[in-house]
Image: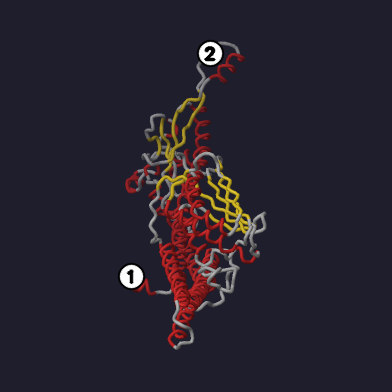
Amino acid sequence: MKRTAASMKIQSKLVIALACLGSLLCVMLYAFMQWSFDRGMINYVNQQEQEYLSTAANRLAEHYSEYGSWENLNGNRRLFGELLGDLWPALQLPPPPPHFSERRPARASDQAHLQRQRPFRDRDFSPEFRREKRPPPKGHFERANVPSLLDANKSPIFGRYQDNHLISPIAVSLNSENNGTGEEDETLSKQAAPTIVGWLSIPPPRYSLDKFNLSMGEHLEVAFVLVGLVLMMAVLFIGVPLSRHFVNPLQQLAKTTYALTRGQYPTLAGRHRHDEIGQLWRNIASLRNTLQANETERRRWVADISHELRTPLAIAIGEVDAMLEDVRPLTKNNLMSLKQEVLQLNRLVNDLYELTNAEIGALRYNKTKMDVRESLIQALQRFEELMTEKNLQLDVQLPNHSAWIHGDVQRFNQLMNNLFTNELKYCNPNDTIRIALTAHTKSRQLEIIIEDSGPGVDDEDLSKLFDHIYRVENSRNKNTGGSGLGLAICEKIVKAHDGIIRASHSPLGGLRMTIQFPSINR
């Protein structure tokens, strides 16, 4: 069963889910309507009976006020029917036979008839008897039950009483005897509280409501069957297009991702949607662009590395062949030229190795608390003689106090060596190199600025300086141009110290390198 559900298509699952949901709602609505109808109809019928009881109780209260007791109603069904017959037709009795209206002594010939016939008063006129004789018409609410009269203690005077009967009190105002004036009698009458002298009860309706419920239930069943059929048609005509609206983009996404796994980069459509599927389209499009950019960068990287390795190897092989064929003599100078090419190739391989380690996180960093000011002074001392030989002017601006960061001293020295080496390569004699260290207390940042007045860099080249195998000097001269990996390695070292490095134009006319590190307290 699980395997079958897992193998079903989303469109089929969605249609089945909508159909099940509609059927469930239909059943719940039918049950609720049936329950609500039963409760509402029963309350309505009980309310109607209660209103009849209240009207009948008022009539009986007037009768009690007139006669002062219930004695004349005790067993007198005819009088009881005359009082309430218009409310309960079942209480009305046919006219009595003539021998009941003529008050004459019974003759001997009538004795046998009188013995065979029960007295009229003793006949069974109970609600059950009349229900059997005169059933109500089908589909109508006949009040087949007749009321019963109870005394103040709820003892039956006329009829029967049970605990589930509907009852209504019969209250009258009993005025005590008073010898005062008429005004005093009127005042006492207003002040006398009504007294309950009896109760009027009636059994709750049963058979009439059940028959009506049965008829109403049949109509509800037919109506809900029709609603169910209409709902199924709506699921087919609305659910199927709706499921396609969601499924078709997913199928296109599946084809696109499959093409990406094969190294293809198809054009994506459907990103104009603003729902979750549209967001998924945009994420897939971003993934496609990233993969395509990485593939382009990889191909360029392979091409540049091949060129960088091929150039010194080709020069070295050419010089060796020339000396072997006696084109060039085997002298110390020619061997030194060959050694330079080998050293260039060795530097390139070492830079590639360090850059690869930096990208995969294999470079080791032994971070401790280090003084950036002291490390900068030591780096300047290492390059001071070389800069003096090239007649470069140094402008050093360092604070008088120490500046601390959490970093690796060896990697920091490697960072400074790469940057100062670039200054020596690209600055012309008599150029100015400015080195400044600033501590920003509010932002808790240390900022190092290294800028020069040498040849500048075009705007389009600034954003590419940290790319692999990228050099502004396209001649790739072995004396000036490096491997093109130095700044890429610098960027990896700075990021490993939670810092940033960026290149910009210098006010001196050359290139400015700005490095920021998070500072720490001593």
Q: Please name the residue that numbered disc 2 is placed on.
A: 178
Q: Is residue 503 left or right of residue 203?
A: right
Quadrant of the image occupied by residue 21: bottom left
Image vertical order of residue 90 relative to residue 333, above or below: above
Q: Amino acid at mark 1?
A: Lys
Which type of secondary structure does the marked residue at label 1 adopt?
helix
Residue 320 lies, in percent from the top left, at 44, 82
Q: Is residue 453 left or right of residue 283?
A: right
Q: Amino acid at mark 2?
A: Asn
Q: Is residue 489 visible?
A: yes
User: Residues under labels 2 and 1: Cα distance?
Assistant: 93 Å
Residue 2: mark in rendering: 1
Would you call the spot at circle 2 few (<14 residues within 10 Å), some (14-19), or many (20 or more)? few
Would you call the spot at circle 1 few (<14 residues within 10 Å), some (14-19), or many (20 or more)? few
- In the orientation shown, which residue stands out farthest toward the bottom? 325
What residue appears at the point 38 percent right and 41 percent down from the top-left corner?
A: 164
